[in-house]
Image: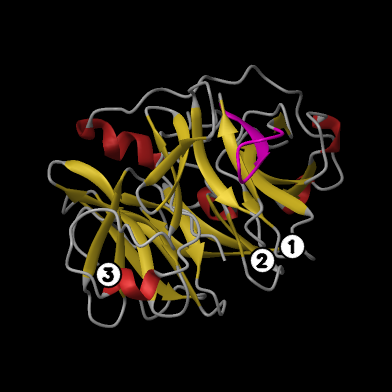
Amino acid sequence: MNGKTITKALTIAGLTGIAGLTSLLNSTTAHAATTGTETVAYVRAGAIYKSTGATEVRLTADEGNARPRFNPDGTKLAYLHNGTVWMMDANGEHQHQVSDRPAGGPAWSPDGQSLAFAALSCTGGPGVFRVAATATSTSAADEPLFPQSCRDQAAPQVARAESTEAETPAANLVDRLRTDDAVAWSPDGTQIAFRGGECESIADNCLSIGTVATGGERAIDVYGGGGNGTSGFGVVPAWSTDGKKVAWTSYDADGKAVAVTEADTTGANRHQVGKADDREMVYAGTGTGVLTAAYNGHSWVTAVNLATGRRTPLHQGSQPTVAP
């Protein structure tokens, strides 16, 4: 596996700020809450929407959008548009391209000044880049972070980005997830979790955490080759709000199961969160996960109480993001 191409971005539905998430978790109503205090952002058929309670506003006029992520103060969204990193205000205004490099789902630095994203590295495989949040589609400003060996080399020339597809049938979910290159920045700003890394020299698939200051890496989930002997993958990482846990979407090819795995930042003490076929979890505070689940024959953004397992479907969609 050389990872020479960056995956097509997935269609998403992302959660944003849930000001009244506690009340949602206590609700037994299996639909979006209508208290007027919850704000969610998500993608439907390639367009990004935002809802507060039952009021929905479409943020993007066009389609081909994916993986929105709120900045630390909830005023902006980074997202993929036709496979490259874009940014807009949380109300949908001032949409503009940040990098023209074909990319995976972006992540904000905790200070809101930078974005990290996965893209083709100098090695010919996937790498991680950093770009200033003020950038305007100048690929020369994309700074290589991982692998470390690319830090003193010029970034590869920008290749043509592939358009984001509309929602793909569920039968293709595993294929879409397998090469999903969304990244996650740790709450303290010192580390980035990403698919691939140096571990791919001995493994078929792996998930890594890299140290931003030094470029050092460690694998936390490894499949095949010199890994755990099983076939599968780990993708779409997310950090707990205290930085002590990492969650990711895992796939065990032997068991043919997609699930959310949570572990320490070393990869130890891992366990499954939620149910089979749950995926793409992010954290909302200290006791809640928000993930994509199957509900009424569709993908739904769903809140899960991490202590009790209680589930509350919020909105139809997938790939949630939660605003502070």
Q: What kind of element bears circle 3?
A: strand
Amino acid tagged 3? Gln
- Do the numbered discs 1 and 2 sit on residues whose CB atoms are within 8 Å? yes
Q: Which mark is residue 108?
A: none
Give the residue number, with chain letter if any, for mark 2.
191
Q: Which mark is residue 212?
A: 1
Q: Position of residue 147 (x, y in %)?
A: 69, 50
The magenta segment: 83-94
Above or below, 46 relative to 72: above
Q: Residues within 10 Å of mark 2 (few under 14, many from 20)?
A: many
Give the distance between the C-alpha atoms of the residues marked 2 and 3, in whole angstroms.
Answer: 23 Å
| Left or right, residue 141 beside residue 241 | right
Above or below, 184 relative to 165: below
Circle nearer the N terminus (1, 2): 2
State the scheme by which the image is colored. secondary structure
Give the residue number, with chain letter if any, for mark 3.
272
- Do the numbered discs 1 and 3 sit on residues whose CB atoms are within 8 Å? no
Q: What kind of element bears circle 2?
A: strand
Amino acid tagged 1? Val
Residue with the most extreme top position: 160
Give the distance between the C-alpha atoms of the residues marked 1 and 2, in whole angstroms.
Answer: 5 Å
Amino acid tagged 2? Gln
Circle nearer the N terminus (1, 3): 1
Residue with the most extreme left position: 296
Closer-to-camera residue (90/181): 90
